[in-house]
Image (cartoon, helix red, strand yellow):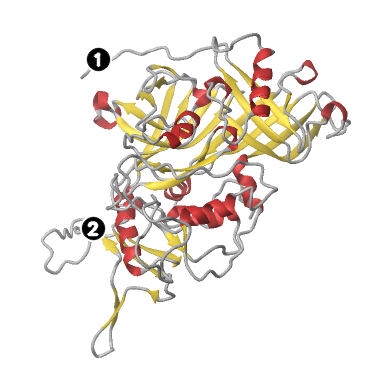
Amino acid sequence: MTNWAYSQTTEEGGYFVVLFRAPGQSWTDVTYFRDVPIQINSYASGDPFSDATAVITFPQISGFDNFGVGELQWLSGESDVNIYYIEPGKDTGTVDDIPNAVINSLTQAKDVTYIHNPELKPVFQGFVASCSINQSENEASAQLELQGALYQVDRLISKPNFPSRPSLFENLIWDAMSPKKHPSLRIRELGKPLFPDGWNKLFPTGQATVFTPVGGKPGQKIVGYWDRVTGDFQKTLTGFVQDRLQIMFTPDDCGVRPGDKWTIMMGNNRKPVLKIRTKETYIYSNPDYAYALSNFDIGQGGPQIELTFGQIGVNANLTSDFSQIVNVIYGEGRGIDGVEWKGTEISSDGEVSSYKPLGYKDYAYNEDNNSLFNPLRMRNEAYVQYGTGMGYEQAQDAAKLQLSQFSEPAWTGSITLTVDPTNLWTDSVMSRWKIQAGNSLRLKYFAGSGADGIILHIAEVSCSPMDGTVTLTVDSQFRDLLSLDQVVSRTRDPLTPAKLLRVGQQS
């Protein structure tokens, strides 16, 4: 057995900074409002959409206060909130100077000017969703529940129109989330899709037809999906946008690793980006992507942090669930030409109907003339409703890529940290308070993996500063938070396209 030693990876002395901005006003530092420190109960992020929820408490505010006026002019319903963690020894002046530097940078930032100082990147960006007043004989406080900045998009309903030609998915998503289209949104425009070097899906050339998408130029890099569905009267973010993301896989002929999914994550200055969720190490040499590399902490890809299984301060609870395997996929849908399909096969005499799967693993299906068929392996079937806009051949490709994520058991579960991990990109200690969903980690010595470890995607991060703990929801198959939640809770089939993320769900 390989010998290894415990390493001390915790640091003390860092502190949080909390800024509020009421609509139409400038940023205000409220970290020590009325000379009493704010309490950060928790904050969480997920993949997709980054910042999800947070809870903060003001022990110095009571029900006698008048919100939104006077010294509380910064506190109103829907105020923007940014939470920062300043690491020990990283500040450039006194404690009072750091909030001012943050405020000045945010006030001066434009859509094309980005903050590159890592100490000024927030660990949470959101807005006030609700306020609770707690009053007793001995104490009083105001507790605020926050939602992540992107979840403001869910206050809009996606409305359909009926274009004569389909639109690129990236354009449909941009329209749905654009503050130019929806002036009430307090986020920045969705960035260009972050295409890694080698990506070769290009906008179609040749004579345009009614099936040729609009919104691109010949030779332009595109995600590779298009649709006539411009809205469906669902919540815009966790309905319409999430449904598009659920089927946006990297195909076999894209030039990079197939079977990965596209996701939307929030960068600095409330600017979202469309990027690929992958365990690969990708290179982004296009200078147009410099902002993403410096503002989304994605580096050049690959795992960002490293932990050792059994290390003091690292508590892991991981499960490999064989019941969630899917190795045969059936489905139905409607192509952009309006033709419905179900994979139905009818015998020549019309007496017998059967259904052909969209995709399957050779060991699980088609026992006739199939030397790879293995009756000792259980068949696990799934039925997927692809909806409008995906033809039969496209659905076959999607099913093949979905099987790559669901046909083998994965390691899923949680890892709770009371120590700081190692940052593999900088070869230094990284504060656990800065870990974000969407990153990945290397867990050494787990399940016989030795020093190389296994790579786990961080689908959700829940931070509890009052307890000193950070809990990571992880998955070795790099699935999004909703798919992972379905696998873990077994509430519904893990491949059914999502209608609502649980985060922010009202009913």
- Mark 2 vs mark 1: in front: 2
376 vs 143, left or right, is left
Residue labelled with disc 2: 361
**Neighbours of disc 2 within 10 Å: few (<14), some (14-19), many (20+):** some
**Neighbours of disc 1 within 10 Å: few (<14), some (14-19), many (20+):** few
The label shown at residue 486 is: none
Residue labelled with disc 1: 3
As helix, strand or loop, the secondary structure at mark 1 comes to: loop
| Residue 16 position (above or below residue 474) | above
Residue 77 is at least partly visible in this image: yes
Amino acid identity at mark 1: Asn
Amino acid identity at mark 2: Lys
What number of labels is visible? 2
| Residue 52 position (above or below residue 95) | below
Quadrant in which residue 280 is drawn: top left
Residue in the image at 46% along x and 52% along y: 245
**Relative image position of residue 13 (x, y in whole percent):** 57, 11
211 vs 58, left or right, is left
Residue in the image at 57% along x and 63% along y: 231
Residue 491 is at least partly visible in this image: no
**Relative image position of residue 145 (x, y in whole percent):** 68, 37
**Relative image position of residue 197 (x, y in whole percent):** 33, 39
| Residue 119 position (above or below residue 93) | below
